Structures are given as structure tokens and as C-alpha cells.
Amino acid sequence: MANTDYYAILGLTKGASAAEIKKAYRKLARKYHPDVNPGDTDAEKKFKEISEAYSILSDPKLKEQYDTYGFVGERGAATGPDFNGFDGFGGAGGFDFSEIFDMFGRGGGGFRTSGATQSNAPAKGQDIQYSMKLSFQDAVNGVTSKIRVNRSKPCPTCAGRGQVPLARPTVCPRCNGTGRETAGGGLFHVQRSCSLCGGSGQIQEAQCNACGGTGRKPVTETINVRIPAGVDNGSKIRIAGKGEAGRAGGPPGDLFIITNIDPHPFFRRVGDNIYLTLPVTVSEAALGCKIKVPTVSGSTTVRIPPGTQCGQKIRIRGKGIKSLRTGTPGNMFLEITVQTPETRNTRVRELLHELSEYEDPDIRKHLPTEE
Ligand SMILES: [Zn+2]
Ligand SMILES: [Zn+2]
């Protein structure tokens, strides 16, 4: 930012006059305007650069700052004006983009340079994202919950338009009531309707004081949210129409609830499947048994077959989580860990010694060892 040479960007040297600056900018803007170079990102970048340079150099205050210090601090020159920000431009430079495009016999395309035109165009409001913490069980079963969301509603004073009718219309300061203005300079002189009053010569509306011209009023709203069964971490639930207020009668944006689920003390979730580590004793694993285990929806009794090994997985069909999309439940998997017995008890030690006589001496024969 400090080293940006705004004069060079416009092909000028320091000390150029206001007329030279305007002329240079006009020439370059015609060449690089995105409407003339659709899809050309280089041209767009260049256009932003020259627009930024012009917005600084055409403003006597900013120009003086820039000439003195080599940069402009307060106005966010680092980012430059973005394409939606041209509103403020007219104020800074008094330059109207539509001037350029009247010369081509067309309007400024997507560019609305007159504040009045822009605020009257209806537009959908912005979406809001809301992160919601849920317990593991609420995510499994679904839950209805009230949340408080900071959003906005259309300003009741101006019905979201940002402007209110004046009690008495005033003479348009731009055209002095003639309804016409002269566009262009140098070789071009074009008469056309005044861009501020639209040719009526009068200003009928003023910025709404209740909302400062934004057309929106901030509200804190309590919203009932139904979280469907089966949501996972990061699931996105759309609540239509509960985002920010639309502009000038446009529809409101949407509210998106992003779920953030607490881990469970012993269930692990992978997709719609549930994993549970199940400790069994040596005798249970070897002889087989029946065990009552908890599930996400209660409990169930499973048969551990004789000869079950440590690390073996046992599937229980349909005891996982109900799929958010299909409604069918996933599966539950028991991951068996065989617990080695404590040997403080003498009798246990005796039994294990006895057992060892019957154990497989070749248990590790598949692991060759070198002498
Ligand atoms: Zn308002
Ligand atoms: Zn006017």
C-alpha cells in the first residue's frame, strides 16, 4: 500500500492536474471496464487498480495526503473499492461511471452508480450460519429446541427501501431542476437524463433515518428449531427465510444451523454405524456367553460365540443410527477385548498353570525366529 504509485497506474507523473487525472482515468476505464472485457480477470484487476488510483487522486483531501506521505491511511486504500462499493465513489471523485458507457450507447451494465437506483433494486438477504451444540443422544433421536438468533427485519419506517418520501420535494442539486445533465468531456458531450433524479428535476425521497438507509432493523429472534434424527457433526439444517432481511422488498436470506455434537462416553460413531468396545473374560471368550449391551436406543442381548478372539468384531444389525437421508438405521459393532485374569488369587494361578498344560505350544509358529 505504501509503495503504490497511483500516478504511474494512471500513466501520469506526480503533479498532474485534476483535469489530467480525470482524462487519464476516463481513457483507461473505458479500456479496462469489465463490461468491455467480460471474463478477463487481468482487465478486471487493472480496472480495480485504476479505479483505486482515481478514487484517491480525484479527492483533494486524499490526494494531498497521498502527495505528502506517499500513502492514504484512513480510507482502506489497501483493498480498494470493490465493485459493489461504487456508491461511495461519486462522493469521493464526483465521477459517474455511466458517463463512460453512455458514449457506447448503453448503460453501465451491472454497475449502478446512482445510489437511488441501487437501493431500489430488490435483493435477497444474506444467509446466517449458526453453530449449535448437541448431545450425542439428541443427535441420534432428533430434538426440538429454541435458539436466539441476531438477524434483521425490513425497516418498518421505509419498508426496507432505505429511503422515505419527502414531505415536500426539493430541487435536484445535480441538475438544478433541469432534469438533464451533460456527460463526458473533451470530445464527448452528451446530454442525458439526470442520474440523480432520473430526469424529474426533483428529489422526492431522502435516506430513512430509522435505519440509516440500510433498509434493515436488527432484531433478536427466538426461533424454534427441529433437529431431525441422525444429524452428524457438521450437518447443515436450512431454515428458510430466517436469515437477514432482503433489500427493498427482496426475500430474506436463510438460516443454516451447523450441528456440533458432543462425543459419547463409550459409543463411537462412524457415519451411521456405532462402535462399542466390549471387554469379556477369558472364559466368556473361550466358552461363549450371552451379554446384555447398551445400544443407542436402549439395550440388547448378544451371543458371544465360543472361541471368540480378542479384536474380533460382532455386528448387530440395525442398532446403529437412523440415517438422516434414508431413514434406515446403520449397524452396531462390538469390538471384543479379552481381559487377562488377575493372578493375586492362588487358586486362579493354579488353574492357569493347569490350563497352560493344554495350551497350543505352536501358537507362534508362523513367526520364524533366527538362532
Ligand atoms: Zn428505514
Ligand atoms: Zn437531477
Image (cartoon, rainbow, N blue to C red):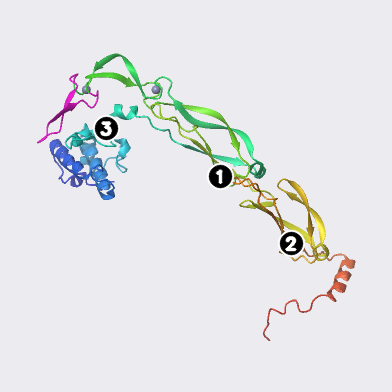
Ligand 1 positioned in quadrant: top left
Compare residues 241 and 268 and report the one nearer the observer.
Answer: 241
Which badge, 2 or 3, is on the more N-terminal residue?
A: 3
Q: Amino acid at mark 2?
A: Thr
How far apart are the alpha carbons under marks 2 and 1? 33 Å
Compare residues 65 and 20 and report the one nearer the observer.
Answer: 20
How far apart are the alpha carbons under marks 3 and 1? 41 Å
In the image, taking residue 265 as reference, residue 183 lies left or right, namely left
Residue 225 coordinates in the image, percent (x, y): 58, 34
Residue at 19% x, 41% y is: 30
Determine which residue is flagged by label 3. 113
Q: Amino acid at mark 3?
A: Thr
Residue 337: mark in rendering: 2
Q: Tell me the magenta residue range.
A: 176-198
Residue 252 sits above or below residue 298 on the image? above
How far apart are the alpha carbons under marks 2 and 3? 71 Å
Residue at 66% x, 42% y is: 141
Bin the neighbour count of mark 2 within 10 Å (Cα to Cα): few under 14, some 14-19, many 20 and up: some
Residue sticking out furthest to the top: 168
Compare residues 41 and 38 and report the one nearer the observer.
Answer: 38
Determine which residue is flagged by label 1. 235
